[in-house]
Amino acid sequence: MTAPSDDFGGLVTRATRLWTGNFGNLLVLSLVFALVAWIPVANIGFLAGYTRAVLKVARGGKAEPGDIFRAWDCFGDLFVYLLLVVVAMFALNHVPVIGQVAGFVLSVVVAPGMYGIIDRRMKLMDAFRWSLETIRGDLAGWILAVLVGSIFTAVGALLLGIGIIITLGWGSLVMALQYDKGEQPRVIIL
């Protein structure tokens, strides 16, 4: 059996290969997302579309910029889910010393649920429960995926902000592959 860090290294390598192999496609996808993500409330639907497009790339498909506009079926549950997370993050940011750490922990804990709503069309409470179960199953993998995915994305933001369109796909692929890792069929040996 391999250590979680060995599995994660392979995941980052695979994300990097997918990112470089689909660079132009992901660049256009991220550019379109960056242009429409500024629209209040509707940006939740565009986030769902972007996430589905990245999942398509992670699964070997080819995403199209139009995919960003085709994910309104999960809007309601995703909106409430993210609203609750934002309110909790806001409250945590006002807690001295440990607030920032608690905010990061919360972002890790809720990440799988967001994918569950977007990809599996889970309902709000089912997504929270499933997210907790998923985190319990691979806490180290999710912490690394959220941390490394955020770092990859932030590197682009440091390049005068516009570089985020270059690195957003890379960071998103890391987290999408972590999500898909948990979705692999399991073989049961009797």
Image: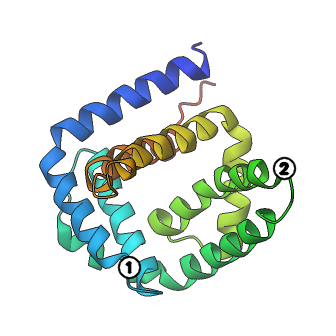
- The answer to whether residue 70 is visible is no
Q: CA distance from mark 1 to mark 2?
A: 30 Å
Quickly name the residue at label 1: 38
- Labelled pair 1, 2 in contact (Cβ < 8 Å): no
Q: Nearer the viewer, residue 82 or 96?
A: 96
Q: Residues within 10 Å of mark 2 (few under 14, many from 20)?
A: few
Query: Residue 21, percent across and down?
Result: 16, 37
What residue is rendered at 17% in x and 45% in y? 23
Q: Is residue 57 left or right of residue 180?
A: left
What residue is rendered at 39% in x and 43% in y? 155
Which numbered disc, 1 or 2, marks the residue that appears first in the sequence?
Answer: 1
Quickly name the residue at label 2: 98
- The answer to whether residue 74 is visible is yes
Q: Residue furthest left?
A: 24
Compared with 127, 124 (above or below) is below
Query: Residue 137, percent across and down?
Result: 69, 38
What residue is rendered at 19% in x and 54% in y? 27
Q: Residues within 10 Å of mark 1 (few under 14, many from 20)?
A: few
Compared with 93, 176 (above or below) is above
Q: Is residue 104 left or right of residue 184?
A: right
Amino acid under disc 2: Ile
Amino acid under disc 1: Trp
Query: Residue 164, percent across and down?
Result: 33, 54
Q: What is the secondary structure assignment of the residue under circle 2?
A: loop
Compared with 152, 5 (above or below) is above
Total label count?
2
What residue is rendered at 34% in x and 57% in y? 161
Query: Residue 111, percent across and down?
Result: 59, 55
Q: What is the secondary structure assignment of the residue under circle 1?
A: loop
